[in-house]
Image (spheres, grey):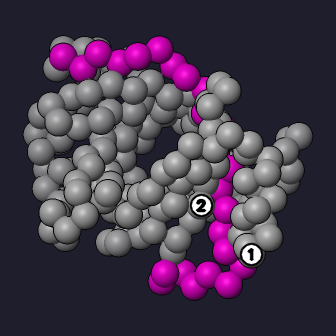
Amino acid sequence: MREVEIKFQVPDIEQLLRRLSELGCDLGESVREDDLVFNHQEQRREARCVLRIRTSGSASVLTLKKDIINELDCLEIETGVSDPDATKRLLMELGYQPAVRVTKGRRRGKWDNWEICVDEVDGLGAFIEVEALYPDGEVDDNAQENLWQAVVSKLRVENLSRVNSGYDTLIARSGQVYIGDNE
């Protein structure tokens, strides 16, 4: 499955939530997510591929994200994980190292054919992600720009700043690093 995503930083989350409600997007309650992102020790930047263990409540998921066009337009494969600690050890044995921890409150909803995530990311602020999923081979390289144009024309919220990186990259750029499970 290919995930095409666009992301905006949101200066006024209440304005965004009102507008999404006006557009018929019913967001669920905020759920806490804890993502541990792994990079391979021999990875080249031009071939970005990360693994992530996401834990939310008692459920955990392992996700592979491999850039196609950029970080927000990627191949995404997910599978459930019954033991996140064993999965972490397995990944480390394969040469992957914990790089960044991302913690956030996330509200999910549907709008048109898109998945909407309104996130309050610890250390970064508020964001909206709009995601479209396409079967492999059924999307062209302009999908992200087409999604951007469609969402901006319908959403009409002021002062949104487009973001072209994942939360893991934004946190790493801010100087926050993974320093262990107890931090």
Kind of residue at disc 2: Leu
Number of disc labels: 2
Q: Position of residue 8 (x, y in %)?
A: 36, 44
In the drawing, does residue 19 fall left or right of residue 100? left
Q: Mark 1 sits on what residue?
A: 95
Is the C terminus in the top left, top right, bottom left or bottom right quadrant? top right
Frontmost residue, 99 versus 154? 99
Q: Residue at (45%, 68%) from the top-left corner?
A: 66
State the extent of the magenta-drawn residues as a range: 24-47
Name which quarter of the figure residue 15 lies in.
top left
Frontmost residue, 139 versus 70? 139
Q: Which numbered disc covers residue 37?
A: none
Kind of residue at disc 1: Gly
Name which quarter of the figure residue 168 lies in.
bottom right
In the drawing, does residue 98 fall left or right of residue 169? right
Q: Is residue 57 visible?
A: yes
Name which quarter of the figure residue 127 lies in.
top left
Q: Mark 2 sits on what residue?
A: 51
Q: Residue at (36%, 47%) from the top-left corner?
A: 7
Q: Residues within 10 Å of mark 2 (few under 14, many from 20)?
A: many
The reply to whether the C-beta atoms of the residues labelled 2 and 1 are less than 8 Å apart is no
Q: Position of residue 157 (x, y in %)?
A: 24, 31
Q: Residue at (39%, 53%) from the top-left corner?
A: 163
Q: Position of residue 11 (x, y in %)?
A: 42, 32
Residue 152 vs 22, above or below: the answer is: below
Residue at the front extreme, as displayed: 82
Q: Position of residue 48 (x, y in %)?
A: 51, 74
In the drawing, does residue 49 fall left or right of residue 96? left
SS at badge 1:
loop
